[in-house]
Image: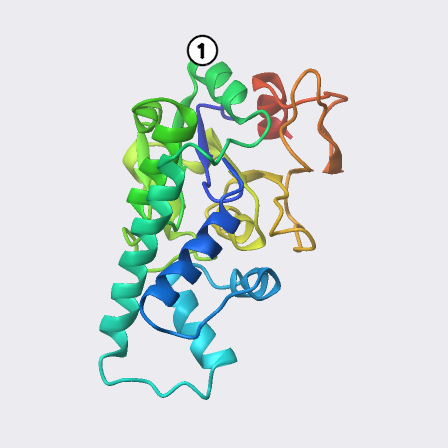
Amino acid sequence: MSELRALLFDVDGTLAETEEVHRRAFNQAFAAAGLDWVWSVDLYRALLAVTGGKERMRHYLDTYRPDYVRPAHLDALIAELHQAKTRIYTEMVASGGVPLRPGVRRLLEEARAAGLRLAIATTTTPDNVTALLNASLAPEGEAWFEVIAAGSMVPKKKPAPDIYHLAMEQMGLGPEACLALEDSANGLIAARAAGLKTLVTVSDFTQGHDFSGATLLLDQLGEPDAPCQVLAGDAGGARYVDVDVLRRVHAN
């Protein structure tokens, strides 16, 4: 078994519970454009089955709004809406109102101290990633990560494995040296298709997803004074995820 050398993190739902902020940003962008599109919590939970904001908007029209008369410039409209939504989202996040999930900062600090390499593998835009890391992790928090593979850097988004392949290629590592951390079924499918063992922490918007294939499934990473709950797999009796747990999961 190869030694664990790198951790590949998803962002939305994994590092922080950002999906509600994304939902509100979408709705604000729609309202500002004079559209009657409103995404409720339940609707947005269903829309998350489609990765990528522009793809999600198109799916919404195809599935939920057959009544909407599509303009000839629909592609441009969707692109403009996505740009507006990204601006609104990054402004929300920059205010510091989106904390990292329990255990995330601690684990990142421990991983860095242990010499593990860190990377991001996400379908959200690079601007969204940078805004979250700098506001919620640390000033210039993106510098904690050797590689940030994000957004449209690959032809296909999750559940395709492309973003993971890109991150590993840029790091010069194979899947046997890495561990993925995810929160969604699409993310798990992508990581597993890339040959990665995967630790999943269920998020607010992914409860009820099929996480078959996760090496370890938890409600959160946990803290010494706020233990995690193991939902599937073996954490070796640990009350929270530290580097030793990650190495055990990787070697499982």
Find residue 36 and report its horizontal and vertical position in percent.
43, 75
In this picture, residue 136 sits left or right of residue 225: left
Give the residue type that dot 1 points to: Ala
Question: Residue at 32% of width from left, 49% of height from top?
Answer: 125
Residue 69: quarter of image: bottom left
Residue 245 visible here: yes
**In the image, is residue 214 above or below residue 244?**
below
Q: Is residue 52 visible?
A: no
> Would residue 228 be found to the left or right of residue 97 on screen?
right
* Rendered image coloring scheme: rainbow
Residue depicted at 53% across the width and 27% down the height:
104
Q: At which x and y percent is residue 16?
A: 51, 37
Q: Eyeballing the image, is 89 above or below 36?
A: above
Task: Give the residue number, with chain letter if any, for mark 1.
Answer: 113
Q: Quadrant location of the C terminus?
A: top right
Residue 19, horizontal then vertical, whole percent: 51, 49
Place residue 169 in its image quadrant. top left
In the rendered picture of this protein, how many numbered marks are placed on residues?
Answer: 1
Residue at x 43% of width, y 57% of height: 160
Instruction: Looking at the picture, tell me which residue is in the foreground, 112 or 17.
Output: 17
From the viewer's side, name the closer residue of 92 and 12.
Answer: 92
Provide the secondary structure element on which disc 1 rests. helix
Looking at the image, which residue sits at the far top?
A: 113
In the rendered image, the quadrant that contains the N terminus is top right
Where does the image place residue 33, in percent across and percent down from the top left? 31, 69
Reply above or below: 118 against 40: above
Horizontal side of residue 198 vs 74, given as left or right: right
Toward the viewer: 182 or 126? 126
